[in-house]
Image (tube, helix red, strand yellow):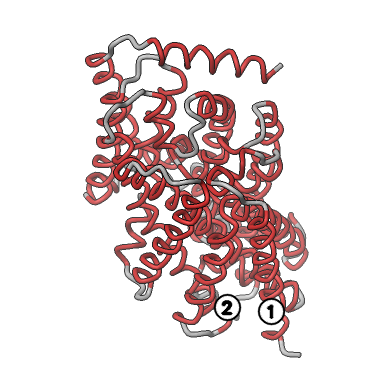
Amino acid sequence: MSDTTFKLIAIIIYMAAMLLIGWYAYRKTANLTDYMLGGRSLGPAVTALSAGAADMSGWLLMGFPGAIYLAGLGEAWIGIGLTIGAYLNWLFVAPRLRVYTQVSSNSITIPSYLQSRLKDRSPFLRIASGLIILIFFTFYVSSGMVAGGVFFKSSFGLDYHTGLIIVSLVVLAYTLFGGFLAVSYTDFVQGLIMFLALIMVPVVGVFLTGGPAETISTIREAEPFHLSLIGGTTTAVIISSLAWGLGYFGQPHIIVRFMAISSVKETRSARRIGIGWMLLSLIGATLTALVGYAYFQQNPHLSLTDPEAIFIEMGQIIFHPFIAGIILSAVLAAIMSTISSQLIVTSSALIEDLYKAIIKSDADDKTYVLYGRLAVLFVAIVAFILSWEQNGTILKLVSFAWAGFGAAFGPVILLSLYWRKLTSQGALWAMITGAIVVIIWGNVKVLSGTLYEIVPGFILSLLVAVLVSKATYRPNKEIEQEFTESLEMLERERK
């Protein structure tokens, strides 16, 4: 068999496994809470790895190693910022959000939680937050589909549109029928594949470059600052890179996992597993870039046309074609895990937060599950149409979507969990402020080239939330009671 055949067999086995998991989850989905939150039944390992896989996307295996390959360890500050942000998110947001969403009307989405938590009588807060999720994530999903099409084109020489159709159909199939459980279980498996691949490539690859000492020597001879965290960078760049960690507090597809874990007690185990996975994966991605840099320096007759493909290239060089196919599956897993997570969150925003808020239907759970599946199909079709042509504006939007979600939702989520006096008006204007500041700042080159847009967006959103809430605060016994009840429940579950 040819090398391509071995790789295709590995990819087909991987995709068949994803569909099988989707079928299994379909059999366990009975109502809307099951479809949107997996019945709040996730264990710590599934919660941790599914959150990690949904978070990292193809960035971990392509964008991050590519940046370090080109510019050196100075680019690792983003990874450091993300690790700190993820840890703080697990520590401060996960336990309280798990409890508060249950106490406050058993909320199953971020917008419905905010409306219930703040006792907002009008639909504006829920509709505004639902629209932010719907708009940003529709474009986000389309960018993942574009990445899938490009993956098949660059790895197998398939037509871009053929690859796009394959990825879209497989992700749609298991997300459409299995819902949140399918997304979480597939993300867990995809997280394992990504982790193993990121460990295997640098560990085996370092032998090709003559061992650790020879590898370091080769890199230093080629570029002295390549192994320096601060060489060739500036204070503003370091601050901007570390600020990526702020985004975690407002990412709907990540913090929704905190709402789905089986108990508060499990968040501690999940935090350890999740941060352990993240640290080792980021170290693996960093070492892959450095080993790859040394390898291509030692073999000048070889050329790397795309630095972001260093992980894929090293996998092809090091391993048997079948194992190389599994390495390719890891890249595909990173792409698909994020698409599926964003699809299910967008679906929940469309049905739970927009349809229910506007139509106020009293349909039964089976009908809502059907609506949820139709919403997944609708969003996937719109995203597919947007991704048919590789539109640069979509990719540009995604580049600051992380900042948009972090600035719009991050301060509001934190204040809702830790400050009794947050009001619905404060939350609404904070979300609008955060989103607008990020969009404007990110599109003005003078500003975006100086400081990452999440920094001003997050700070101004937080400031607006506090000032408006202080101006509009009125004592509310129901809010006080729920806040106290959530703290008491948190204490009980921790014991």
Which residue is depicted at the point 75% across and 68% down?
208
Task: Give the mark nearest the N terminus, 2 or 1.
Answer: 1
Q: Is residue 464 visible?
A: no
Percent coordinates x, y for residue 258 in the rendering:
57, 36
Question: Is residue 466 placed above or below 292 in the rendered structure?
Answer: above
Q: Is residue 43 visible?
A: yes
Residue identifier under label 2 = 155
**Does residue 481 appear to the left or right of 283 in the view shown?**
left
Q: Quadrant of the N terminus?
A: bottom right
Of 492 and 368, the residue lying toward us: 368
Helix or strand or loop: what does disc 2 sit on?
helix
Of 367 and 422, the residue lying toward us: 367
Helix or strand or loop: what does disc 1 sit on?
helix
Residue identifier under label 1 = 7
Percent coordinates x, y for residue 455 in the rendering:
35, 35
Question: Is residue 228 placed above or below 338 in the rendered structure?
Answer: above
**Does residue 139 appear to the left or right of 338 in the view shown?**
left
**Does residue 16 appear to the left or right of 433 in the view shown?**
right
Percent coordinates x, y for residue 290 in the rendering:
62, 58
- Residue 200 appears in which quarter of the rendering? bottom right
